[in-house]
Amino acid sequence: MSELTLDPQNWEDFRALAHRMIDDMISHLSTLDSQPVWTVAPEQVRAALDKPVPYVGQGMEKTYRDFQQYVLPYSLGTPHPRFWGWVQGSGAPFAMLADMLASGMNTHMGGFNQTPAVVERQVVAWLAELMGLPHGSGGVFESGGTMANILGLAVARHVKAGYDVRESGLRFGPDLAVYCSTETHSWAQRGVELLGMGNRSLRRIAVNREFQMDVKALEAAIVSDRAVGMRPIAVIGTAGTVNTGACDDLAALADLCERHALWFHVDGAFGALLAVSAKHRHLVKGMECADSMAFDLHKWMSMPFECAVTLVRDDRELLNTFALAGDYLRQASRGPSAGGLYFSHRGVDLTRGFKALKAWMSLKAYGVMAFAALVEQNIDQVQHLVRVVAEYPELEMVAPAPLNVACFRYVGGGGSAARLNQLNEELLVRLQESGEATPSNTVINGKYSIRVANVNHRSKLADFDRLVTAVLKIGREVSRAFPA
Ligand SMILES: *Cc1c(COP(=O)(O)O)cnc(C)c1O
């Protein structure tokens, strides 16, 4: 009897299965256009997934068949060329392979004396340079934009609280205040809640008609909060808001933060990537002045989920916010532990995966110019959509679409605000259920909108024409069901 291991008993059989899995996934990815974007899982599929704990294994072959039968066909459809829901990201095939290599290596990325750590530091340095941050900045890969932004806010709290928050918590000082706009993504609320400052500390400043933070209102709020004894610590600017793709006036925010000695954090979840495009980088002017920033690589850089980065202008501040070590983590001057826990000292996670590999391999394989071209292509496609929408009196834009996000609705048949909201809600769900396209929804100034957020490297111009055709067809059907 041999001792137990999870390695295959027959590596050649395993190799054959592995090759088949890769072939099947490549077939899936190369035929997405002819598949529905999304298909609801039938009851029998849900029933087939509702199984007792598998105490005795059924083997790899059968398990892979279960995946093919029950899992793959009923996923969200994110990689599909007509998926533009929320802001997610379509994933690049080469990066998928990098993820497999990273899992195969299964190296622990707390830090350590290993080239994978050198790779992550290198990618962080590349990204900092692309964002215009100076030498001496630092950063760390994170799961998503939410976590990556929260780390930035944690550094802000550490540096600006005015006393040692790490040692004493938030019990002793005045109430802290953090400023964002009413259009800032909900990560900010999660952040202030998690960091113990409470939702009350998040001051949501009004926006102008372009959905940018009103800088005058911001300054007034800071002054009046100070007057009542609060301690303002940070301003969160957004490069590319989730609702409409607006970019705050980051240069004005940077200037204001400088004058008021506040931390300037930029949420660039997708919009930070504008910095790589010579055509669009003026929109994020001032971002290079940020004390910290965060963005997703799974959105406009098409890395498979999850992949995001936090960058901090002064690496020492990131380190001071998070570094700690038990005796069992003490580093040596030579050997595998030399270099210590470089990344664990710059974030919350101790054990971390090698997310940086897919970014490193993709940047090297495709080059930054390709990502810049994709950013420009996605914006051009949405500007095309805006023009097509304008051609039909039955359609209207609901908000300005300066970038790669468009919010529009069907207004055929006219009628009350309530009717149009109901009609568009039904229209959107029917469109999603048809499998033809997956935009998502938002509500802007009380108007329920169909929202297209395009960070999709597979979309073509014709896909947006197909969207409009489908919206008109379904809109006319639904319009009859909702008489004005
Ligand atoms: C997507 C998004 C986030 C959150 O990022 P996740 O990766 O989903 O956690 C934050 N801010 C903006 C502007 C976003 O678009």
Image (cartoon, rainbow, N blue to C red):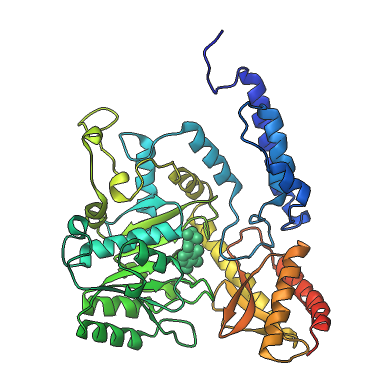
Q: x and y percent of residue 153 in the render?
A: 32, 64
Q: x and y percent of residue 250 in the render?
A: 37, 76
Task: Find residue 227 and report its image quarter.
Answer: bottom left
Q: Identify which residue is drawn at 36% across, 36% down.
A: 115
Give the vertical position of 29 relative to 289 (above or below). above
Give the vertical position of 451 relative to 421 (above or below). above
- Residue situated furthest front in the rendering: 52
Quadrant of the rendering where the C terminus is positioned: bottom right
For residue 259, say whether it is visible. Answer: yes
Q: Identify which residue is drawn at 67% across, 31% down.
A: 19
In the displayed structure image, the side of residue 259 where residue 25 appears, left or right: right
For residue 274, say whether it is visible. Answer: no
In the displayed structure image, the side of residue 10 where residue 147 appears, left or right: left
Q: x and y percent of residue 70 in the render?
A: 72, 44
Q: How many marks?
A: 0
Q: Identify which residue is drawn at 71% across, 72% down.
A: 428
In the displayed structure image, the side of residue 356 where residue 44 appears, left or right: right
